[in-house]
Image: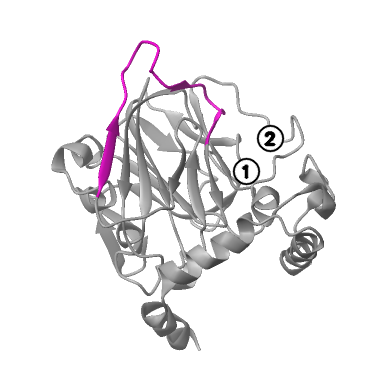
């Protein structure tokens, strides 16, 4: 059955299906939207007591529900300046040392940092032999992404690609998964040096958004697009630790990369560990 599921992903029209689902998710269909939301809540056991708005009828579309805000104060951000916070609710897929240009995807699979970040050696160079973490957001999770440290945006890169599922089964069986899928790469200057925060698309992920640019995808294309941002001035984008930086409409994966000798992950962080936005994730190296 697992082999069948993987084979099906190779042959199905993933972009077409994802965009059609995206149109349905964005539509305001009244009782139909509310019925879909209720079905989703039951199917995935979503704890709506955490949501700022607890009832299905509070949401005008499925997307509005899926990107629902949490109750104020529910995810306090660790205040210690020496601690890096979790950027999302999810579960750790992999984390640890970047081996030159290689990141671990799953047992027997790795992928290229340079490819992940859009293909330019100069973009990837600061993170070689650094640290990385890959966090999977399941359908039940909170789908807003927050800053693990304060940072100033310097570059955003849209990288076209496939839309394979990013669940653990696919990660264990599709080579180079995260460097093959459509993604939005963001590069920040931080007190730790450069930080890459990558938002990876997936099957039926209808949209990837950032707070400074709105919807990045869709639409999609075959070309890589790059946007540069100033460090200071009226057009600079600075986000504090814990601030929202983007969101997924339907689930996906976030990948973080740091330069060498800047951070060390805390002992309770390991593949499979559940993450909660704002909790302690790593510590600065001194």
Q: Is residue 83 left or right of residue 173?
A: right
Q: Is residue 74 magenta?
A: no
> Residue 66 at x, y = what percent?
66, 52
Specify few, some or many for label 2: CA neighbours under 10 Å numbering under 14, 14-19, or 20 or more.
Answer: some
Sequence-first tag of 1 and 2: 2
Q: Real-space Cα distance between discs 1 and 2?
A: 7 Å
> Residue 85 at x, y = what percent?
53, 33
Q: Mark yes or no: residue 200 visible.
A: yes
| Quarter of the figure with the C terminus | top left
> Residue 27 at x, y = what percent?
65, 57
Contact between marks 1 and 2 (CB within 8 A): the answer is: yes
**Which numbered tag is attached to residue 171?**
none
Q: Which residues are magenta?
A: 224-245
Q: Is residue 137 above or below residue 129?
A: below
> Residue 43 at x, y = what percent?
74, 69
**Which numbered tag is attached to residue 75?**
2
Q: Mark yes or no: residue 270 visible.
A: no
Dot 1 lies on which element? loop
Which residue is more in the foreground, 16 or 136?
Answer: 16
Q: Is residue 255 left or right of residue 101?
A: right
Q: Is residue 65 above or below residue 285?
A: below
- Please identify the quarter of the rendering in which residue 56 is found: bottom right
């Amino acid at each position: 059955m697992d082999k069948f599921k993987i084979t099906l992903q190779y042959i199905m029209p993933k972009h077409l299906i994802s965009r059609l689902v995206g149109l349905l998710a964005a539509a305001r269909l009244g009782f139909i939207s509310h019925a879909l939301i209720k079905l989703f809540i039951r199917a995935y056991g979503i704890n709506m007591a955490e949501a700022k708005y607890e009832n299905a009828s509070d949401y005008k579309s499925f997307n509005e529900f899926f990107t629902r805000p949490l109750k104020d104060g529910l995810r306090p951000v660790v205040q210690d300046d020496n601690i890096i916070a979790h950027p999302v609710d999810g579960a750790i897929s992999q984390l640890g040392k970047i081996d030159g240009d290689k990141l671990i995807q799953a047992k027997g699979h790795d992928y290229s940092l340079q490819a992940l970040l859009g293909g330019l050696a100069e973009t990837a160079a600061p993170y070689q032999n650094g640290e990385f973490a890959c966090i999977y957001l399941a359908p039940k999770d909170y789908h807003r992404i927050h800053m693990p440290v304060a940072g100033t945006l310097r570059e955003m890169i849209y990288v076209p690609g496939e839309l394979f599922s990013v669940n653990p089964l696919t990660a264990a069986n599709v080579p180079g998964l995260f460097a093959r899928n459509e993604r939005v790469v963001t590069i920040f200057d931080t007190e730790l040096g450069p930080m890459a925060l990558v938002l990876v698309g997936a099957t039926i992920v209808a949209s990837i958004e950032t707070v400074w640019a709105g919807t990045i995808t869709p639409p999609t294309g075959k070309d890589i697009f790059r946007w540069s941002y100033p460090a200071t001035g009226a057009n600079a984008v600075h986000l504090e630790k814990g601030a929202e930086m983007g969101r997924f409409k339907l689930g996906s994966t976030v990948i973080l990369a740091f330069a060498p000798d800047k951070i060390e992950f805390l002992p309770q962080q390991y593949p499979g560990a559940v993450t909660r936005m704002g909790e302690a994730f790593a510590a600065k190296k001194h």
